[in-house]
Image: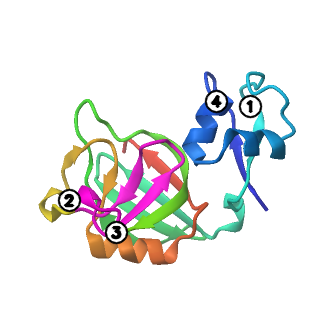
Amino acid sequence: MVAIHVVKQGETLGMISLDYRKPLAEIMAVNAIANPNIIYPGQQIIIPGLPNADTIPYSIEISIANRKLVLKENGVIVKTYPIAVGRMLFETPVGNYIIVNRQPNPGGPFGAMWLSLSKLSYGIHGTNDPSSIGKAVSRGCVRMYNQDVLQLASIVPNGTPVLIRPQ
């Protein structure tokens, strides 16, 4: 099985390619798209190299207001983690995403692990500032305690759905 992206209004194939960190030519080839400028809202785009989210028992739900990340397995809450979210002018993006890749020890302020979301420049990551957890202080990413993000990363595979909600 492969991951599927449903085209939203205003999206381009180039944007989708960047969000999923997949070469444009690869996405065009897999989807038999001759002209990258001709896609339409609602169109299903195959994302190569990622499993279909329906085959993964896990999902992540993030509440920006409550500053909580909830890990579910087959719809049942497994664990709830405290998080930090985006500050004013750098809000954490509300929407439905998937984890597209990961990077252990990414350096800088990103702590012990980086889980890239299918929205360019956004992810779930650790922190070098544990006192920030529970606050709205990031540039839009979801911060976790290092031990929490390592635990989460050891459980969920790439392709796991991530639902970010205001509440």
In the rendered image, residue 106, in percent from the top left (x then y), is placed at 35, 62
Q: Secondary structure at mark 1?
A: loop
The reply to whether residue 102 is in sight is yes
Which residue is found at the position 53% from the left and 71% from the top?
Answer: 156
Q: Secondary structure at mark 2?
A: loop
Q: Mark 4 and mark 2: span between their CA atoms?
A: 32 Å
Mark number displayed over residue 8: 4
**Rendered image coloring scheme:** rainbow
Which quarter of the figure is the C terminus placed in? top left
Is residue 22 found left or right of 167 in the rendered image? right
In the rendered image, residue 81, in percent from the top left (x then y), is placed at 32, 67
Mark number displayed over residue 105: 3
Q: Mark 1 and mark 4: span between their CA atoms?
A: 6 Å
Nearest to N terminus: mark 2 or mark 3: 3
Is the C-beta separation of discs 4 and 2 under 8 Å?
A: no
Which residue is found at the position 42% from the left and 72% from the top?
Answer: 152
